[in-house]
Amino acid sequence: MASLDWYIRSQLKLRHLQLLVALDDLRNVGKVATYLHVSQPAVSKALSELENNIGLKLFNRTVHGMQPTIYGGSLVVYAKRILAELGKARDELRALISGVEGKVTVGALPAAAVAVLPKAIAALKTQSPVTAISIIEGSMDTLKPRLREGEIEVIVGLLPEDDPLSDVETLFLYQDNMVLATGSHHPLGQKKHVTWDELRHSPWILPPHASLMRQPIEEEFRRHRLALPSDYIESVSTMINVGILQHGNAVAFLPSVVAHYYARLGVLAVLPPSIPKLVHPVGIMHMKNQALSPSAMLLIATLKNIYEKG
DNA sequence: CAATGATGCTGTCAGAGCAC
DNA sequence: GTGCTCTGACAGCATCATTG
């Protein structure tokens, strides 16, 4: 076995990192071989060589395929980060070659999709038209792993509760109100007062369990001594939620800016304020231990500038 | 500097072992 | 038998050292 330090510093190659990530994703040597355009023994040998030189077993071979060991799983996390960083370097170089100043990949949570990001992007493009922006919309449970792997540099949306031990840095922008909304044709939309008892007979659109908004909504039901609705759809997509409300008879909590935006267009009705509002902080998240690209720093500065001015 | 041979790396092919 | 992985023999290619 070679020295671990020496091997990682001078012998570990990108090929090995690609192999580890592909094995973790596909869990099958044959599929990894096809994916990497090599033969199956080439994959098997490369992994064996890696394990021998590191002196640790990285994957357990089972009849159902490959399962990462604790060592393999740990190495895969870093391999993904390194490959993501290289991807960013490639994008940055491509951008420089094509005359673009840089690129930032942003994860957008639903609260950010309609108001926060479009406003910030418009401001950023005025300031730096040649900065490229790539947006990935999703829920916290899908975006956070991609943030940790370095694929996404910044997430904008509802902030999780403060955790000093977290590896994610949070920056507060503003407090967002969640309001109840229905389609503009819904009978409840015409009423001056709506009770929770009336609401429980409607179908609901709820955020998934992993979503930050799910718990406060469940608490609101408990506070009114009501069971969670049995007729519900789980969705985190703003566009789909608006479409369902528009074409059906469901109700849903939406970020205030989103609900009022579609209410002005005549698509949705915002229910009367007799229903208590849910309040949640909206802001920016990025990894504490990963350097931000100049483009990501510019986006964060633009966002802070907009919301500090109010 | 160019040509040549040695060496190492990475790959393929063929076949074997193992579990179901 | 099927599906999976591993091993041994060998080949192609790039790099390095040596020599003229």
Image (cartoon, coloured by chain):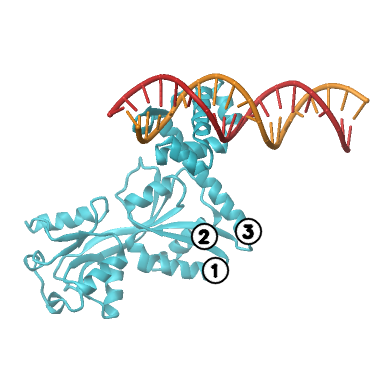
Chain colours: A cyan, B red, C orange
Q: Which residue is mark 2?
A: A298
Contact flag, marks 1 and 3 (Cβ < 8 Å): no
**Mark 2 Cα shell of 10 Å, populated few (<14), some (14-19), many (≥20):** some
Residue type at mark 2: give it: Leu
Q: Quick check: A59 above or below A307?
A: above
Q: Chain of mark 3?
A: A
Residue A46 image point, x, y percent:
53, 30
Q: Which residue is mark 3?
A: A96
Q: Chain of mark 1?
A: A
The answer to which of marks 1 and 2 sits earlier in the sequence is 1
Q: Quick check: A113 above or below C17?
A: below
Q: Which residue is mark 1?
A: A127
Query: Where does the N terminus of chain A fall, quadrant-wise?
Result: top right
Q: Is A17 or A258 nearer to us in this picture? A: A17
Q: Is residue A107 visible?
A: yes
Residue A68 image point, x, y percent:
39, 32
Q: Is A168 or A244 nearer to us in this picture? A: A244
Q: Secondary structure at mark 2?
A: helix
